[in-house]
């Protein structure tokens, strides 16, 4: 037994050079698995924009051209690279190919291709007959990354090359690390000669990085030297050389493994060795898992674009899972700047994901955010934002708690899981008590405090807080009934009914044909109006400045200082009563039509007074418009406001309008990053954002296909609303409790034909429609007479498989 040789370099900023001779290759290249898989190719114009290679234990963020520039603003310039939360491992890596006296850095890829499970960069080396492909993926449940460079000689002569791999360690804590005692210190690099791998440690913390090549190599270390590109403190810079020989029309693969741990060297090495030994099998397993995930709630439409986006947004959600030791497993908000957990974001995201069959992720995410909230607050309040080290940035805005309660009800409707309901109902009671006891000073059932719109000064009675509180009481009343807490159910329902009346009486502003952003006194409103004028003027929105000055004059002339509703910012949250369906139809239609004024070719503005009329005359790049200045959400169009509007349109029987809005959102899919959709439309903010799925999961599953579950009663309500543009489609294997339902349709000019099947024979399907547009109803060729109930025409489908025909 030979003792391992170590080369120890206590350097902060420097370079280590190691030379290898390639004498063999791993048994199986992962390239073949990529070549067989679905993929989407990026646009050349967006090669200098971010992408991610994601796993639930580790992820990498760089640019599509293969480079690793400084990215992000939460920890400025540090949100890219390789992260194994709650620590960062590396700023990134670079490869240089030496061809005799010539060399080329592999950081200007010609092509970027995205896959559900990884990515590929393609480098065509000019005047060299060489092509380099860089494949990369992160396996499930492993804090390690696999990167394989495949070099192909397309010429007629053998090539002798040198391949240099540069790696920059940067072991550092996540955002808010200082709040939990995580303090960065210098990295120390060691080389283990017998194992042919680098081991890097943060000098004062048990944070470890291990990387090296999985190729069969021999190596000797060289004397370190300084490198001009490593001025950043606490990092190490390491180089490794490989001598390659490639025959004509042949390829050589050079794989690397990068692994880490925030606990111990042993964990980092175990992850490294597992991936080095089993990369092919681990990638096969990941591909199989993602394929199985897509088979649940599998969509097919004559609209190929929507079909593709629906599938890939499932993958996007998978890219955003963070399983952090000591914290739990849950979906994060977005990459690169929000790789941690948000109470509000989850409420939207998980409602869509439960409809799309991702029950395990939904359950673990709920468990995580509730545990953190209980530890932080202990009073039912749901946190707003928490970093992956457990540091809570904001203990919770008022909206998050009622949204969490309604999320619990939604999940229970899909699963019928009584243990789930029993487990979380105490949190429901505590949460509702907190909402009213701590945030309703005047005891009028309209809580005061910040909601989804984080605009300075907006902390009075907000429309979204009121709306989501009303829904939470309504949903909690149904939960209480199921749990046979009849007195509590009655109390909750009474509060829900009263809040609904107040919203429609006090927030509705007839002259503006809109719900108010907030209720406030004259003096409170004048201050907010002044701020809004400055905002609109700064953006050059003259129409908004004029409208706000008019409102300012009217408010000054008002002799009353009693609180009332103000339509000021035209924030998207004014549409939340339409999203939850509590607006009377005559009011809702007016509000829906008003909301159209605050959209552009990509969707709904976050803040309506930000609408830029001149810019919106043509499609644009928002990233190009704002340049490289400080990050801002001012003036943005987002998928979430548009999702709320889509759902609202469907709620009031306008699927064609909903479809038109969904197509606006869909324009942004793959706009900058193939296979993904940006947070800000079309190409700004997070390049992968969790709540984007809300625009697809709810409208398509619950509204277009009409699957509305009541798993606790072994009942599925089927209330499809098919837009005219959708001529045929199928949604298969939708999971409701222990049942699976599939629905397909054909939309003819004079008839609608549905096929419905379910896996359980003892479940009831209630097929209903809001009107008798079609006079003839047939089930399995039998003429049936629909019954009118609660404003809908409906029939009971007793069969486990049925053809339903609606015609005239």
Image (spheres, rainbow, N blue to C red):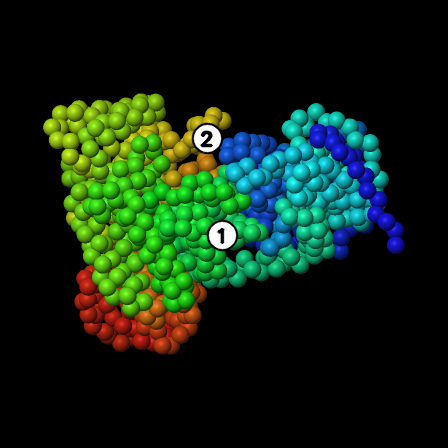
Q: Quadrant of residue 637?
A: top left
Q: Nearer the viewer, residue 747 or 269?
A: 269
Q: Quadrant of residue 141?
A: bottom right
Is 560 situated left or right of 306 in this image?
A: left
The answer to whether any part of residue 733 appears in the image is yes
Residue at 20% from the left image edge and 37% from the top image edge: 565
Is 250 situated left or right of 760 in this image?
A: right
Residue at 40% from the left image edge and 74% from the top image edge: 760
Q: Nearer the viewer, residue 732 or 576?
A: 576
Q: Secondary structure at mark 1?
A: strand
| Coordinates of residue 522 in the picture (x, y in percent) | 19, 30
Q: Quadrant of the N terminus?
A: bottom right
Return the residue found at the far left. 559
- Label 1 neighbourhood size at 10 Å, few (<14), some (14-19), many (20+)? many
Q: Nearer the viewer, residue 384 or 162?
A: 384
Residue at 50% from the left image edge and 42% from the top image edge: 391
| Coordinates of residue 121 in the picture (x, y in percent) | 62, 41
Q: Earlier in the sequence, mark 1 or mark 2?
A: 1
The answer to whether any part of residue 411 appears in the image is no
Q: Secondary structure at mark 2?
A: loop
Q: Are marks 1 and 2 in contact (CB under 8 Å)?
A: no
Cα distance between the residues tagged 1 and 2: 26 Å
Q: Quadrant of the C terminus?
A: bottom left
Classify 488 as above or below 191: below
Residue at 53% from the left image edge and 62% from the top image edge: 292
Is 246 situated left or right of 205 in this image?
A: right
Residue 631's tag is 2
Which residue, given by chain and number where applicable, does mark 1 sit on?
330
Q: Nearer the viewer, residue 31 or 527?
A: 527
Classify 648 as above or below 61: below
């Amino acid at each position: 037994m030979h003792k391992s040789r170590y080369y120890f370099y206590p350097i902060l900023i420097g370079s280590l050079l190691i030379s290898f001779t390639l004498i063999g290759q791993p048994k199986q290249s992962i390239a073949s698995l990529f070549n067989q898989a679905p993929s989407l190719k990026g646009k050349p114009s967006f090669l200098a924009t971010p992408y991610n290679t994601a796993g639930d234990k580790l992820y990498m963020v760089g640019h599509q051209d293969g480079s690793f520039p400084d990215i992000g603003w939460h920890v400025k310039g540090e949100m890219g690279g390789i992260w194994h939360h709650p620590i960062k491992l590396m700023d990134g890596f670079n490869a240089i190919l030496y061809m005799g006296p010539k060399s080329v850095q592999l950081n200007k890829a010609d092509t970027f291709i995205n896959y559900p499970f990884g990515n590929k960069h393609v480098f065509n080396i000019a005047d060299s007959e060489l092509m380099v492909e860089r494949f990369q993926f992160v396996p499930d449940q492993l804090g390690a990354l696999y990167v394989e460079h495949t070099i192909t000689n397309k010429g007629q002569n053998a090539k002798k090359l040198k391949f240099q791999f540069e790696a920059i360690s940067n072991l550092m804590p996540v955002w808010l690390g200082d709040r939990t005692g995580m303090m960065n210190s210098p990295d120390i690099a060691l080389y283990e000669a017998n194992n042919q791998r680098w081991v890097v440690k943060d000098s004062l913390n048990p944070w470890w990085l291990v990387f090296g090549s999985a190729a069969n190599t021999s190596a000797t270390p060289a004397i370190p030297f300084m490198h001009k590109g490593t001025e950043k403190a606490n990092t190490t810079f390491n180089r490794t050389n490989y001598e390659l020989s490639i025959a004509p029309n042949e390829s050589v693969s050079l794989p690397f493994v990068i692994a880490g741990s925030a606990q111990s060297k042993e964990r980092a090495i175990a992850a490294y060795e597992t991936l080095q030994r089993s990369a092919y099998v681990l990638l096969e397993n990941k591909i199989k898992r993602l394929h199985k995930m897509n088979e649940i709630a599998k969509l097919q439409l004559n609209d190929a674009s929507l079909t593709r986006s629906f599938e890939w947004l499932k993958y996007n959600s998978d890219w955003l899972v963070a399983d952090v030791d000591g914290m739990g497993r849950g979906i994060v908000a977005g990459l690169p700047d929000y790789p941690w957990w948000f109470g509000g974001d989850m409420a939207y995201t998980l409602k869509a994901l439960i409809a799309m069959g991702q029950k395990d992720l939904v359950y673990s995410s709920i468990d995580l955010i509730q545990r953190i909230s209980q530890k932080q607050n202990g009073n039912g309040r749901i946190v707003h934002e928490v970093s992956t080290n457990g540091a809570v940035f904001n203990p919770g805005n008022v909206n998050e708690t009622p949204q969490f309660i309604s999320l619990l009800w939604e999940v229970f409707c899909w699963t019928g899981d009584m243990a789930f309901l029993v487990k979380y109902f105490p949190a429901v009671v505590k949460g509702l008590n907190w909402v009213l006891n701590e945030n309703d000073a005047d005891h009028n059932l309209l809580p005061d405090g910040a909601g989804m719109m984080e605009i300075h000064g907006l902390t009075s009675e907000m429309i979204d807080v009121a709306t989501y509180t009303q829904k939470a009481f309504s949903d909690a009343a149904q939960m209480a009934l199921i749990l046979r807490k009849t007195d509590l159910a009655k109390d909750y329902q009474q509060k829900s009914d009263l809040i609904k009346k107040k919203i429609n009486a006090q927030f509705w502003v007839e002259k503006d044909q809109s719900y108010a952003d907030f209720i406030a006194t004259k003096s409170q409103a004048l201050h907010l109006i002044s701020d809004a004028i400055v905002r609109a003027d700064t953006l050059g929105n003259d129409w908004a400045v004029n409208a706000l000055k008019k409102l300012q004059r009217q408010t000054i002339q008002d002799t009353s200082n009693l609180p009332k509703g103000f339509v000021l910012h035209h924030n998207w949250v004014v549409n939340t009563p339409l999203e939850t369906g509590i607006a009377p139809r005559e009011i809702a239609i007016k509000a829906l039509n008003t909301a159209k004024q605050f959209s552009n070719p990509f969707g709904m503005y976050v803040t309506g007074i930000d609408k830029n009329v001149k810019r919106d005359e043509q499609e644009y790049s928002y990233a190009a418009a704002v340049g490289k200045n400080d990050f801002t959400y001012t003036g943005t169009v987002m998928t979430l406001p548009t999702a709320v509007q889509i759902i609202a349109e469907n709620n009031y029987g306008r699927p064609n309008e909903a479809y038109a809005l969904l197509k606006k959102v869909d324009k942004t899919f793959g706009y900058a990053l193939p296979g993904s959709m940006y947070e800000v439309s079309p190409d700004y903010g997070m390049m992968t954002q969790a709540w984007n799925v809300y625009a697809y999961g709810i409208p398509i599953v619950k509204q277009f296909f009409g699957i509305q579950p009541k798993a606790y009663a072994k009942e599925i309500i089927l209330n499809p609303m098919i837009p005219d543009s959708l001529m045929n489609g199928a949604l298969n294997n939708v999971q409701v409790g222990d049942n699976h339902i599939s629905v397909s349709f054909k939309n003819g000019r004079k008839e609608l034909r549905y096929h419905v099947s379910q896996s359980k024979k003892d479940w009831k399907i209630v097929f209903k429609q809001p009107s008798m547009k079609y006079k003839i109803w047939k089930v399995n060729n039998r003429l049936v007479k629909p019954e009118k109930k609660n404003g809908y025409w409906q029939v009971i489908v007793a069969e486990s498989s049925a053809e339903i025909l609606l015609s005239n």
